[in-house]
Image: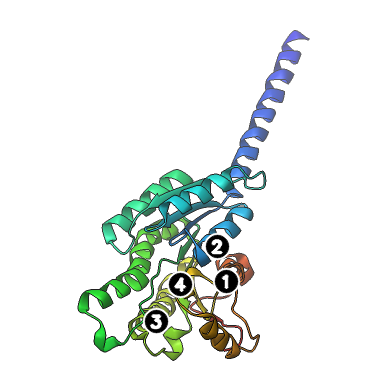
C-alpha cells in the first residue's frame, strides 16, 4: 500500500513538472522577437510600439535620439499591457561591424530574430549638383547599406530556423523619383530592387522579404515643410491628407506577420492615393 502511494505521488509530480515545462515552452514560443532599426521616433517608433503591444519582444535601435528612445522603452516597460522583453541600443547600423554587434547583442537579449524591420533612414533635400560625394555616400549608407548589413547579420539564424520575415521601409520616391531628392530616391530604388531579389533567394527557406513604400507620412522627416507645402502635398493625394506613423506601422505589421504569409518580394505602396 505504501509502495503504491509512493509510485502514485512520483508520477503525479512528474506529470506536474512536465506540464510546467510545457507551459514555459509555450510562453517562449508565443513571444516572438522583432528587431527594428531607426526606432526612436516616427514610423520606427510606431512600429516598435505596435509589435510590443502585440506580444513581441522588441529590440530598438537608433543613433541620434538615444535619450528619447530609452525613455520610450522605460515607459513601455511600466505599461501593464506590455508583456515582452524590450532591448535598446544606440548603434550606427550603416557601419557593418556595428550592425553585426547590435544584432548579436539584440539576439542575446531576446533570442533569435523572427522579424527584422529595416527602418533606419535619412533625408537630403537639395539639388544633386550642389551635393558633395561624402553627402551622397552618407545617404546611401544610411538608407541602403544599413539594410544590407542587418539582413546579412540575421539571415544565418533565420536560415537555421527556416523561418523569418524581413520588412524594408522604402519610399514611393524610389519608384517615381523626386526633384531635389535624387540620391534619397536612388537609395530607396536600390532598396526595392534588393527586396525583390533577396526574396527570391530566401523564399525557398521559409523567409519572406517585402518592402513598405510610403508617401507623405506625418513624421519629423517632413518637419522642414511649411504649412503651405504640406497642404499642397496633401492635395496631391486622393485622401487629401498625410498618413500617420501608426498607419504606416500597420502596413509593416501586416507584412511581417502571417497575415501576409503568401507575400514575398513585394514593394507595397501606402500613399493615400498619390
Going from N to C along the chain, the mark reached first, 4 or 2, is 2
* Residue 263, image quadrant: bottom right
Neighbourhood count class around disc 1 (C-alpha, 10 Å): few under 14, some 14–19, many 20 upward: many
* Residue contact at pointers 2 and 3, CB within 8 angstroms: no
Measured in 3D between alpha carbons, the distance from the residue under mark 2 to the one under mark 1, in whole angstroms, is 8 Å
Going from N to C along the chain, the mark reached first, 1 or 3, is 3
Q: Residue at x 78, y 10 (%)?
A: 1
Label disc, if present, on residue 147 of the rendered structure: none
Going from N to C along the chain, the mark reached first, 3 or 4, is 3
Going from N to C along the chain, the mark reached first, 2 or 3, is 2
Q: Nearer the viewer, mark 3 or mark 4?
A: 4
Q: Residue at x 48, y 75 (%)?
A: 222
Secondary structure of the residue carrying tag 1 is helix
Secondary structure of the residue carrying tag 4 is helix
Instruction: Give x and y (percent) for residue 149.
Output: 33, 64
Going from N to C along the chain, the mark reached first, 1 or 4, is 4
Q: Which residue is mark 1?
A: 248
Q: Residue at x 32, y 59 (%)?
A: 92
Instruction: Give x and y (percent) for residue 157.
Output: 41, 56
Give 17 or 146, whichever is nearer the viewer: 146
Could you tell whether 5 is left or right of 151 in the image?
A: right
Q: Residue furthest right?
A: 1
Q: Residue at x 62, y 45 (%)?
A: 83
The image shows residue 29, relative to residue 1, as above or below, that is: below
Q: Residue furthest left?
A: 133
Q: Which residue is mark 3?
A: 193
Neighbourhood count class around disc 4 (C-alpha, 10 Å): few under 14, some 14–19, many 20 upward: some
Q: Quadrant of the C terminus?
A: bottom right
Q: Which residue is mark 4?
A: 221
Secondary structure of the residue carrying tag 2 is helix
Neighbourhood count class around disc 2 (C-alpha, 10 Å): few under 14, some 14–19, many 20 upward: many
* Residue contact at pointers 2 and 1, CB within 8 angstroms: yes
Amino acid at each position: 500500500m505504501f509502495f503504491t502511494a509512493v509510485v502514485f505521488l512520483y508520477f503525479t509530480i512528474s506529470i506536474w513538472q512536465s506540464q510546467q515545462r510545457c507551459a514555459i515552452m509555450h510562453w517562449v514560443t508565443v513571444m516572438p522577437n522583432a528587431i527594428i532599426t531607426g526606432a526612436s521616433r516616427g514610423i520606427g517608433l510606431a512600429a516598435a510600439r505596435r509589435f510590443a503591444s502585440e506580444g513581441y519582444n522588441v529590440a530598438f535601435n537608433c543613433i541620434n535620439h538615444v535619450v528619447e528612445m530609452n525613455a520610450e522603452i522605460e515607459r513601455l516597460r511600466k505599461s501593464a499591457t506590455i508583456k515582452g522583453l524590450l532591448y535598446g541600443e544606440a548603434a550606427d547600423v550603416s557601419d557593418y561591424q556595428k550592425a553585426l554587434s547590435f544584432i548579436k547583442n539584440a539576439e542575446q537579449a531576446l533570442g533569435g530574430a523572427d522579424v527584422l524591420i529595416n527602418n533606419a533612414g535619412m533625408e537630403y533635400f537639395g539639388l544633386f549638383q550642389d551635393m558633395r560625394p561624402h553627402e551622397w555616400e552618407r545617404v546611401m549608407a544610411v538608407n541602403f547599406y544599413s539594410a544590407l548589413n542587418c539582413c546579412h547579420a540575421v539571415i544565418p539564424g533565420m536560415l537555421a530556423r527556416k523561418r523569418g520575415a524581413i520588412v524594408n521601409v522604402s519610399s514611393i520616391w524610389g519608384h517615381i523619383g523626386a526633384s531635389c531628392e535624387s540620391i534619397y530616391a536612388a537609395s530607396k530604388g536600390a532598396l526595392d530592387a534588393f527586396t525583390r531579389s533577396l526574396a527570391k533567394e530566401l523564399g525557398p527557406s521559409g523567409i519572406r522579404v517585402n518592402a513598405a513604400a510610403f508617401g507623405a507620412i506625418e513624421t519629423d522627416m517632413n518637419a522642414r515643410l511649411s504649412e503651405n507645402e504640406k497642404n499642397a502635398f496633401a492635395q496631391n493625394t486622393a485622401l487629401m491628407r498625410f498618413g500617420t506613423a501608426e498607419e504606416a506601422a500597420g502596413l509593416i505589421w501586416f507584412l511581417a506577420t502571417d497575415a501576409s504569409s503568401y507575400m514575398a518580394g513585394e514593394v507595397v505602396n501606402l500613399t493615400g492615393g498619390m
